Structure formats: C-alpha cells, structure tokens
Amino acid sequence: MQSSKDRPRGVGAGQESPVEQLHGREPDPAGAAGQPRYDDPWYDALASGWGESADVPAQAVAPPAREGETGVAAADIYLEVQRSAAFQEVRRRYRRFVVPACAVFFTWYVGYVVAATTAPQLMARPVAGAMNVGMAAGLGQFLTTFLLTWAYARHARLRRDRAALELRWDTQELTREANGGAS
C-alpha cells in the first residue's frame, strides 16, 4: 500500500503513526495486552504543572460517581455535570472574560469604521512621515486582535483549563461506569 506521498510505508525517516499502524484492523482492547490505553491527548497535561495558579481555589468537584447504578443514560450524566457547581464556575469564568472583551473590541472596531467614514480629515492627519491616523488605527486593529487572542489564551490557561479538564475526566468516569466499565 502506498502512503499519501507515493512511497511505500515504512520508507523514509521516522516511524509510522499509530493511525497508519492500525489501518485495516481494530486496536487491541484496553486490557488485552495488560497495558492501559491512553488515547486522550490530555492524559498527562497536568503533570507539567501548567495552568496552576495560586489564586485558583481547589475546584468544586463534579458530582461523585454513583455506586451500584448501571444503565444510566449518557444524556443524564451530561445534564448532571452541566448542573454541577464546578461546571457553572467554568462557564462563569468564561463569561466574565469574553463578554467584556467582545464589547470593548466591538466598540473599538465600530469606532474605527465610523471615524474612517465620518471624519476623513481626522484619519488623513499625518502622524509620522507617510503614516497617518487612519493607518495607525488600522494597524492598531491588528495589534488589538493579537493582544486579545493572547489574553484569551492566557485567561483560559490560568483560570479555566484545569477545572474543565477535571470536569472532562469526571464525566468520562461517570459514563464509563454507566457503560459497565468499558472504555
């Protein structure tokens, strides 16, 4: 079989990806080889300590795993997690950043467009050399876009990612237990 680069598999630098190795056959079940499977890229995400912040309190734990209950629908589990205090805290932190940031950026963008259309004399005023106010404000739009993206990523990393990851693992555990322990 040929790869997408028209060379036989196994030829060239590097090893084949796990996807290529499994082409045409099913992967081994988690316990078949005696080794647990770690398909989740977030499995060891917190081992490095990223996202830990001194001002983030210990997270409210998602609803505890229910013992002895089987046959619970996944939709019920997701609704239970959605109603949990931990999930509501993650959503609150998200909204507290995104709503004001969007309002400020939208106001800045509309202000730029309105100024460009209604005050061409202001926008044509030279700032330095060939640079005028309109060009400076336009470049400011790009700069604020990158700054907002950086601020959002930093906020998510420091204030939400750890709690969201814990919720994700708790949800996976609850659904795994509801499915009889199968992964």
Image (spheres, rainbow, N blue to C red):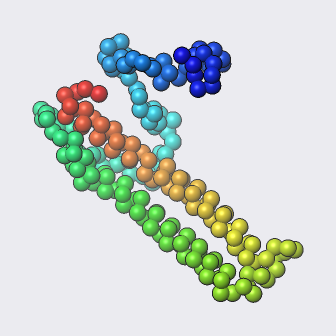
Image: 178 above or below 37:
below
The C terminus lies in quadrant: top left
Residue projecting furthest to the right: 129
How many numbered marks appear? Answer: 0
Q: Is residue 84 visible?
A: no
Is 175 on the left or on the right of 143, as rendered? left
Q: Is residue 166 visible?
A: yes
Which residue sits at x=46%, y=63%? 97
Which residue occupies the foreground of this view, 157 or 110? Answer: 110
The N terminus lies in quadrant: top right
Is 21 on the left or on the right of 81, as rendered? right
Which residue occupies the foreground of this view, 156 or 103? Answer: 103
Image: 4 above or below 85:
above
Q: Position of residue 176 (x, y in %)?
A: 25, 32
Residue 33, by quadrant, is top left
Is 58 on the left or on the right of 10, as rendered? left
Q: Position of residue 84 (x, y in %)?
A: 25, 52
Which residue sits at x=13%, y=33%? 70
Which residue sits at x=81%, y=73%? 131
Q: Position of residue 67 (x, y in %)?
A: 15, 34
Q: Position of residue 118 (x, y in %)?
A: 65, 87
Residue projecting furthest to the top: 33
Which residue sits at x=50%, y=55%? 155
